[in-house]
Every structure is written in C-alpha cells, then in structure tokens.
Image (tube, rainbow, N blue to C red):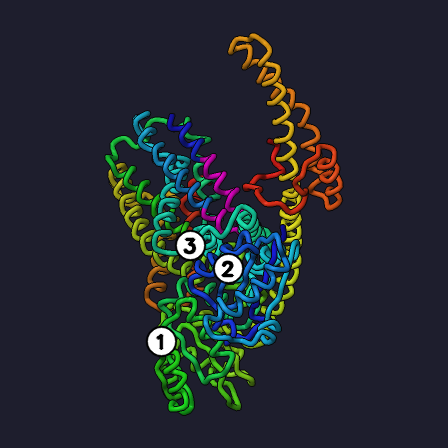
Amino acid sequence: MKILLVGMNHRTAPLALRERLAVDDPVPVLRKLVGGEEIDEAVLLSTCNRIELVVLTRNPDAARLRLRSCFRFDLAGDEAFPAAADLESHLYEYTGPDAMRHVLRVASSLDSMVIGEPQILGQTKDAYRAAVECGACGPILGRLFQLAFATAKRVRTETQVAARPVSVARVAVDLAEQIFEDLSGKKALLVGAGEMTEAALAALREHGLVSVAITNRTPERAAPLAARFGATAHGLSELPHLLAEADVVLTSIAGDGPLLTPALVSGALAGRKSRPLFVIDIGVPRNADPALDQLDDVYLYDLDDLAAIADRNAAQRSRDVAKAEVIIEEQQQRFDGWFVALRAVPTIRHLRERIETLRADEVDRVLAKLPLSEDQRAAVEALTRSLVNKILHAPVSRLRREAEREEGIVYLETARVLFDLDEPAEGGGGTDGADPTDGS
Amino acid sequence: MAVVDLQWAAAIYLIACLVSATGLVLRSRRLARAAVWLLAAGALLHGFSFPLLHAQGEAPPLTSLAAASSFMAWIGTLCFLGLLLRVRVAGLVVLVAPAAFLGVFLAALRLPSVGPATFAGSGSWPHAHVLLASAGLALLGLAGLSSLVFLIEHRRLKAKASVRRPFALPSLEALDRVNATALAVGFSLLTLGVVTGMLWVQAASGRLFVGSPHEAWSLVAWAVYAVLTAVRFGGRQGARQAATGAVLAFGFLFFAVIGVGLLT
C-alpha cells in the first residue's frame, strides 16, 4: 500500500492552466478514480492555486499512469489539452512519507502562495468532506487528513506563522486595523496612483473598506482607476476637502516637494473632532512632510517604515516556518508509524484465524466424545478461547510493535513461515480501518 | 452568605485576571474571550451579593468605603460587558479584570465589619449619593483605563517599532469611543452623585456645604471633569489629549474621593 500524490500548484503551473483543470465538483472524478482497480482511496483538492490528487494504491505504477490520465482527460474535459509532455512539466509527484508530509504542509498553509493564509485549511476540509461523502476516502486517507487538520491547528496555535504580514500592502492593512475599529465604514483617498498604492488599496478593500476617492493632477487620468475600484475621480484642487472626509490616505504622486504639509492636514483635521487619519505615503520622493507625524491624530507611515516592518516580520516568519516544519515532521512520523504498522494487520488476522480454526476443531472433536452438560461445554469453550488469547497476546503485540519499523518485515515473514500462513505479509488490503497500534 | 458570594466572585475575577494575563503573554484571542466570559460569570455572582447583603443588615451595603468599592467594581464590570456589545474592546479585559478583582477583594475582606447605618435622619440621600457617585466613579475609571491603553497603543504606533499587538488589544478608535461614552455617562452620574451628596449634607446639617475636605476635594474633582467633558465634546481636543486628560482626571478624582476619605 502506498500513498501517492500528483498535482500542480502556483509554482509549477501558470494560472491559465490551473484555471482549465480546476473543478468545482470533485465527486464525478473521485468516483471514476476509485471505480478502477488501481486506486483504493482518493481525495481531490482543487483551489485557485493548486490541483492535487492524493490516492491510496496497491499498485503505484498503474496508479501513477491513472492519475496522469485523470489530469489530462478527466480534469481537462474532453479537450486533449494540454499535450502530455507539456502537462508533465507542470506536475509534481510525491510518494509515501513525502506525500504525507506534503498533505500536512498544504493544510498548514506552508505551501501556500501567501504562507499562513487561512483559506487553504477550509478548502482542504471541503475536499476531504466531498471525498468522504462520495465514498472515495476510506480509513487510511481519512486518518491522514484528520491528522493534517490537527497539524494545521497546532501550527496555528504553536507558531505565529499566520500572524505576521510580510508585504507592504498587508502591513498597511494590519496597521489600519489597529487604528480603526471597523474598516467597512471608512473612506479612503488615493492621491495619485502607483502599483503599490493600488495593491494596498485592494488589500484594504478586501478587509471591508468600501468608499474610495481618487485625486490626481489630471482627473481624466484617474478615471480608469476610479472605474476599476468603483471610486470617484477628482482634481488636486479638491484635496483639502477630500482630506477632511478621508480616514485612510494612500499617496504616491510625482512631484518636487511634499504635497501633504502640516498646514494642509491640520486644516483638514480641524472639523474632524478626534477622528484619526492614517496616511500611507508610498511616493518616492515622499509626498507627505515627515512633520505630519507630530500631529496627534495623524499616523504617518512612509515606504521605509512599512518595508522595515515587513522585513522584520519576514525574518520572524522564517523562524516560525522552521518551527512549523518541526511540527510537520513530528506529525508525519507519527502517521508514517501508524501506516507502516498496517502491514501487520493481514498477518495478525490470518494468524488468529488459523489458531481459532485449530481450537474450534479440537474442541468439537473432544466435546463429541464427552457427555457434558451445556454449562460444562460453555466452560470448555471459554477456557480454550482464553488460553488461545493468552498464548497469542505476546507474539501479536510484538508483531504490531515491530511492524512499525522498516526492518519489522522480517518478523512478519517469520510468523508466516512458522504458522504456515499463505497470505503475503505486505501490501494486502482489508485493513477495515483497524488500528494496529491499539491493544485489542 | 453574601460574603461567601463575594469571595467566589473575587476568585472568579482572579481567574479572569490570570487567563487574560496568560492570553496577553501567549497573544491568544481565545484566552481573551475566555477571560471575558469568566468576568461575566464573576459579575453575575457578584450581583447576587448586593440584595443578600441588603437583606442581612439594617444598613444598605453601599454605606461603607469597602462596600462602595465592591459596587464600583461591579458597575464598572457591567459597563465594560455592556460596551462589548457595541464596541470591540474585549482586549481591555486585561485591565478590567484586575480592577474588578481588587474592588471586590477589598470588600470581601471588610464586609463583615459593615455596621449599622450612621446616617440616621438623612433619608435616602446617603444611599442615592453613594450609588450614583460609585457608578460615576466606576465609569470614569473605565474611561481612565481605556485611555491608558490608548496612550500606550498611540505611542507604539507613533514609534513605528512593530505592528504586533499584544493579543487583541482594541483599536485606537474603539478605545476613544469607550473613553467618550464612559466620560459622558460617568460625568452625568458623578454630577448627580455630587448633587445628592449635597442634599444629604443639607438633610443632616441644614447646610449644603459644611466645608469638609471630602466635600471640597470632590467639588474640585467634579469641576475638573466638567472642564474635561466640555473640552472633549466641544470638539477642540484630539484623541490623545482626551486620553491624557481622562487618565489624569481619574487619578485626581480617585484621590479626591477615596484618598482624602482615607487620610481624614
């Protein structure tokens, strides 16, 4: 039995390809996969950044081909796109412990485009739920995904990997949330336009900010941007009035000197009572006079301030990621131990069946010759069962323990030879979700 | 029974303190929320002690400094919990819980010594005065606490040293709202407390003002708050100045009402 994972993500495949292969409903694909002989269990994770198939198989080579064909034909629809060679260059594959580790890393958001983003855990849970509901996910992948969810929770609580924004735009949002109670009722003012101010504005809008005004030297040039953000476009002459209304000012406009001077901003603040003003100055040279910071209700952050915070957070995040990787490794080894121990299940089951058959035959033979009452027969049955269980307890426990080690296969082979068990020790299915580590 | 209730309330407040402090260290919002629930449970139990105490003795429970501190802690906690319904300030629990604990702990220690009333002949004025003044003081204390956190957060944001907040400390805007609301309601109650106090003095001595240090300092503290409130709601003050004023004014009020009472 092997766990196999084939997939593509934002690092290996362009968005255009991911879009073509993404599926809204994984159930038909999963049913088709587990309907074949190569694959016993399957889960399909399809998000905007990744499409991954995780399967449990007794025939890894055949399953590998089946998954590739699934990507090429089932996920891409009827179109023979992309060409096999092209598709292959975008796919990655993990088997065994590497596949387990990858699932844990994905659920914990360590493999995400934005490390620590919370959505991936929910998406992984949805993928798991869909697979369980259509019967494609059995006890083994089920256990792997449950462990992945527990691992993600541990990573989130034991590290700060998700707590630190590392881009200038996200730092701006984080600061805005420390200044304002709720961004949804706030007004943003964009002075000029630049790639970074637009990114910061987009991030603020994701966090609820709705009302946006854009001001530029030539309002006509601001119009397309205003249309994109559902904003109003204004000329610079309206800046004092717009400043008085604004809560967040994002500025990035070309010019010789600072556009936002203390005199201008003080005038705008006069009628605002104690409403704070958050100024994000991304202009180079700076658009806001640093003296603005002396005004009590103004929180001015320029590009250097934001970048310095982002850099500090990035350094801290890399330490957090290292801590998270240790957790992942620990959890992966835990699952791997359990998974390897599953090898013992068929051997132990056959051993028990063999001994039970012998016991039952011998008891029947003896009881046929003895004139015993029903109670006495029941006592003999109980006695022999108890005896068999006690004799088997030590070797079965030892087999379970040894099966968790790679070299434990020797013990399983020895047991098969000694007790003349015809079922091969490795591979065989029919674990029925049995937990080889339990004491039963 | 009432004392036992107070001791249990003190114990729950103390657990809320520990949970919120742990949340602060571990930066856990979940622990902050747990501390708020514990605070609510403590307040519920605390609330039962007042009618029980009233039923036990001839004097109402608010006619001693210790019992008044318990009442202040309770009102302050209730106001904080009420504000949580409108403003996201759960992080303030890290200061409100210790304040509630201290208030009720003092009362739990001294409640058995609450004796019969010494306000005979003054009618209901003493009780109205202590009730209103305690509630006012509790709210102005809440304004002071939120302002203190505001000043710390303001300083941190101005320093640009880090974007990391210790767990879920409220935003500056939320803290300013708490300050404004608590100041408006607290000053109104304090005003009523001063008026009922003067009526009590008149009922007892025939004069509105007998010139006791407590009276004099309380009037000065009320005047300080009157100026603070007028400036704050007159729109001539920034949030940081308002917060500084709220912290200083509460320090002065605390001295005028409690400190002078203890010293004289």
Q: Amino acid at mark 3?
A: Val
Residue under label 3, please give it. Answer: B89
Q: Callout 3: helix, strand or loop? A: loop
Mark 1 — residue?
Answer: A245
Q: Is residue B24 magenta?
A: yes
Are the numbered discs 2 and 1 placed on the same chain, yes or no? yes
The spot of residue A290 in percent (x, y) is 54, 78
Q: Which residues are magenta?
A: B10-33
Q: Amino acid at mark 1?
A: Glu
Residue count near mark 3 (Cα–Cα under 10 Å), binned few <14, some 14–19, many ≥20: many
Give the residue pinned by disc 2.
A44
Q: Which chain's residue wears label 1?
A: A
Instruction: Please state which amino acid type lies under the numbered disc 2.
Output: Leu
Q: Quadrant of residue A86?
A: bottom right
Q: Is residue B112 above or below residue B141?
A: above
B206 or B226, nearer to the observer: B226
Q: Earlier in the sequence, mark 2 or mark 1?
A: 2
Placement of A2 over or under B113, stated as above or below:
below
Name the front one of labels 3 and 2.
Answer: 2
